[in-house]
Image (cartoon, grey):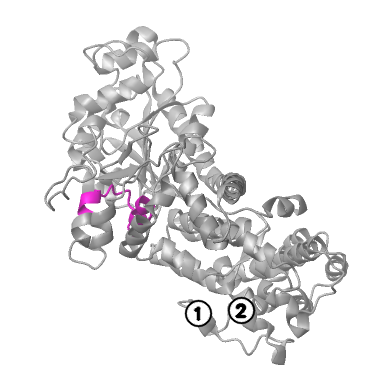
Amino acid sequence: MAAPPCDAPLTAASNIQPFFVLHKAAAASSAPASRGRRRADSSQPSLPGPKSSKRSRDVDASDEDVSELYQRLRLEAFHRTWSKIQSTIDEVLRGINLKLFDQVLHWIQESFSAIRAIAKPHHSEIQQPYPLITDVICRRIPAAFVLTKNAEFVDDITTFRDLAEHLESNGCHLAKLSATELSPKNGVGGCFRNLLRQLLSDVPDVADVSSLASWYCDTENYDQPIIIIIDDLEQCSGDILGELMMMLSEWVIKIPIFFVMGIATTLDAPRKLLSSEALQRLEPCKLTLGSPTDRMNALVEAILVKPCAGFCISHEVAVFLRNYFFRHDGTITSFISALKELWREKIEALPEAMQKYAFSLPSCTSGKNSSDPSISISEGLLELLKLQRDWSAVLLCLYEAGRHDKVQLLDIFCEAINPDLQNASNRDLFSKTTSENLSGAKLGSGNRFIDQAMNTVRYLPLETLSRVLDVWSAHLKGMSEISDKLKELQSTTIGADNVRTAKEKWTRKYLVPVECLPFHEIICFKNVGILQSALIGNPRRMVQLDLLKSQSHLKCSCCSRSGTAVSGSLHDTSIMCNLAQEYGDVINLHDWYIAFEEQDSAEPLLRCKSPVFFGCQAREGLILCRESHLALRDLNRRDPVADGIKALDSIL
């Protein structure tokens, strides 16, 4: 599509054609010189401008080169930091899921052995078009129903993907069917053809069960079960799925096919979805995935409590993340999205904290934290990180005791980083802190979480208390003072009161919130407003701001003094629109244009009509940038600042 002329009238409100942004390239010879002359005239009106203009152009070019370099370094720093966090998240979730995977594999092996105990048909018998055994009991397909308890299906995608890899690595044949494939539009024939495509290298024109039987008779395929994974049973068509099950059940002795199906709500879902005849063809097994709260506790320990990426968060941000998690029905995906936004914003704000340097930071100028001027920032950060490691160890010990009284790590974490606990008027005890500091917390009997964890020690049986001390010993490794005291407790007759007294002493000494420590501004993210605006925010306002600054995103070769064309970059508008509703919607820019038409912000939108993706079509003349739809969110696009991150990396 050709670009319209610059003076073309504005399109009508009902016109849903893609919007255009026309950027007129400046002449290579005139634009820089004229800008230089204006700057020279304003600074030295009595002197001619050629030398000043040239110097100004050189400074501008140098500044732009440095800015582009910093921008690239910031992006690299963010990718490096987030990749470290993401790998930790994947490892934690995989470890939690491994127990379920082993249960599924054990069930498959038992079911396969039971089928082979009934009959082990020869290759020639498998390819016969009639059933081998007509007994109804022998025509029941083993089916595992996995209760995931997730409100958001996105949380289950990784789980079932890893499950497929785990089963395949243990010799099973794998096929996955989605709710889209199990729909009336595709029918049973289309669904079965999709199944064959995943198993057979060459699917015949007439796809039937005999084709699958011939494939299964091959030496490399025989004597291994075929697992069909359906990750979201409740979204499938019950009629299509039931018909497929009844068809395959006739061949279950010849071709051992098992179903593994995910259920998000209750285990009664199959009875509501499938007909009674289809249910009679199943041999069900019920399994349960770890609850979202269990996974959340594991993520909090690995990402927030332990020094995973070298950054930490304030009490206010922690409470926001906790409430954000529960407002989204406890979905892990929403929490990880919030984490990613948090780290990006923290890296972006890091240079400002570094530039203020150590001793001008508020935490270093206060009386109780007055720092020795001879201490370098590296030494200060090293000491801060050491204190954080000790804090993490003591907190995990508290959680190990509190989990026996159903204390959640996210709750005790939010309370432990509350700076009010370090109140100067009562630093020896935490009794002044009330539970109101944690918005929306489940208070149980009224005790706070730290006190609740400490009181739990008093009522633990000796056998359980001994196991708790063993876990404490692992957490406190490297803290010689506490480790020696712990060994003394373990070597004598264990007394609950002695353990509780020792734990209170360690808590008073080491459980100091990070916001009370010097240099914490450098590594602690405290601006909950930025995080809230990005994750919940005001999308309409952000659209307006993005449109007003669209030229900063339009980086074409004619505007870049370095002369290098920039590839298309995702516009902030697409991010903010998707942040409003994190359900994968693709929003048409024209809809947003209509929404703004009656508002004060309509004028900048009419004037700009900003695209989502920018790309140069020519080096000179009119540069056309167009796109009709907002793309899905991609947080990797945004450029986090990372000056000083390399120094921090070397410390970590």
Determine the residue positioned at 37% across, 56% down: 546
Question: From what the image shows, is residue 367 above or below residue 652?
Answer: below
Q: CA distance from mark 2 to mark 1?
A: 10 Å
> Which of these two is toward me, 456 or 188?
188
Q: Tell me if residue 583 is in the magenta stretch.
A: yes
Say above or below: 138 vs 562: above
Instruction: Determine whether label 2 and label 1 are within 8 Å by CB.
Output: yes
- The answer to whether residue 97 is visible is yes
**Residue at the spot 54% in from the left edge and 74% down from the top edge:** 316
Return the residue at label 2. 452
**Is residue 132 in the magenta section?**
no
Task: Please indicate whether residue 575 sits to the left or right of residue 410 in the image.
Answer: left
Out of 205 and 499, give the one closest to the viewer.
205
- Density class for disc 1 (Cα within 10 Å; few <14, some 14-19, many ≥20) is few
Residue 269 appears at what percent x and percent y? 28, 50
Three-letter amino acid code at the position of disc 2: Gln
Q: Residue at x 84, y 71 (%)?
A: 489
Q: Which residue is mark 1?
A: 444
Circle 2 packing at 10 Å, graded few (<14), some (14-19), many (20+), is: many
> x and y percent of residue 122 in the render?
39, 10
Tag 1's secondary structure?
loop
Which amino acid, mark 1?
Answer: Gly
Tell me the quarter of the picture where residue 181 sits: top left
In the image, the segment drawn in magenta is 573-591
* Mark 2 residue element: helix
Residue nearest the observer in this picture, 439 or 148: 439
Residue 175 as seen in the image, left or right of residue 77: left
The front one of 111 and 615 is 615
Dividing the picture into quarters, in which one does residue 245 lie?
top left
Q: With 286 as the anchor, is 299 left or right in this view?
A: right
